[in-house]
Image (spheres, rainbow, N blue to C red):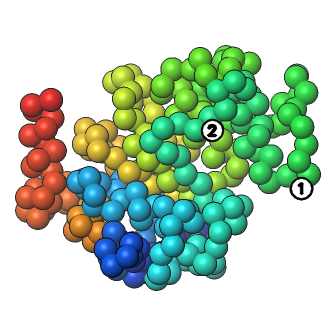
Amino acid sequence: MTISFLEEDYLEVTGLTVDFSGFKAVDGVDLTFLQGSLHFLIGPNGAGKTTLVDALTGLVQGTGTAMFRNKDLLTMKSHQIVRHGVGRTFQTASVFEELSVLQNLDIAAGLHRRTRSSLLPRGKVPERVAEALETIGLAPLAHRPAGVLAHGQKQWLEVGMLLVQDAKVMFLDETVAGMSTEERDNTGELLKRIVADRTIVIIEHDMDFMRRYADHVTVMHTGKVLAQGTVAEVQADPRVQEVYLGTAQEAEHHG
């Protein structure tokens, strides 16, 4: 059974190119994102990481193919991609700050409803929403406005919003930026808990977080894939040390 799930739910990217008036921000990228794996996308600023995810989520136009569940994401509009089971977060959490945690989750869950029902009546919580609240650890804060949440909690709420949408592919953009050590650890454990039956791709600059939690790493540089493999394989690659890990490590020591 597991093998059939893997066959169905991996995302196969072939020859992905994003061209901005002659500048190739992403240049002929081939990648396979597997289900059940925490896949980290790293590289210097300007390497093309976010643009690659923008193309796969319908925010910019790309050429090539990106096959998921027998459909090419590059031919779909962003709302179709969401309904097809692909979701993302951004560097700045985009939650409805004046609404409660519960209402945020219910709105996200409503993406798959046939009718635009109003916000759920208090006391009646759909099972999917209740499960997500427990998973992301925000059940005690269900009725608090999202705006009062700590930075890390807002990021967890965004992950919860993807869970209730039943996103089978999640792209997370610098999820742990600005988090405390404890929040980072909680985030890593949360991602490990939910990755089994989905594909999670994390754009990340935090090398310590990457070393602790990555199953697979892809390093991008100037719009191309520079190297990929396990953390150990990528860290041992001289090209990666030269263009990225060396400078990242220096920044860690000096910062």
- Crowding around mark 2 (Cα neighbors within 10 Å: few <14, some 14 to 19, many 20+) is many
Q: Residue at x 33, y 63 (%)?
A: 48
- Look at the image and tell me whether residue 35 can be seen: no
Q: Quadrant of the C terminus?
A: top left
Are the residues at dot 1 and dot 2 in contact (C-beta closer than 8 Å)?
Answer: no
Q: Position of residue 142 (x, y in %)?
A: 71, 22
Q: Residue at x 23, y 54 (%)?
A: 44
Q: Position of residue 220 (x, y in %)?
A: 27, 63
| Alpha carbons under labels 1 and 2: distance apart | 21 Å
Please state which amino acid type lies under the numbered disc 1: Arg
Disc 1: which residue: 114
Q: Position of residue 181 (x, y in %)?
A: 34, 24
Total labels: the figure holds 2
Q: Residue at x 80, y 46 (%)?
A: 110
What is the secondary structure assignment of the residue under circle 2? helix
Please state which amino acid type lies under the numbered disc 2: Gly
Of the pair 177 and 201, the residue shown nearer to us: 177
Residue 45 numbered tag: none
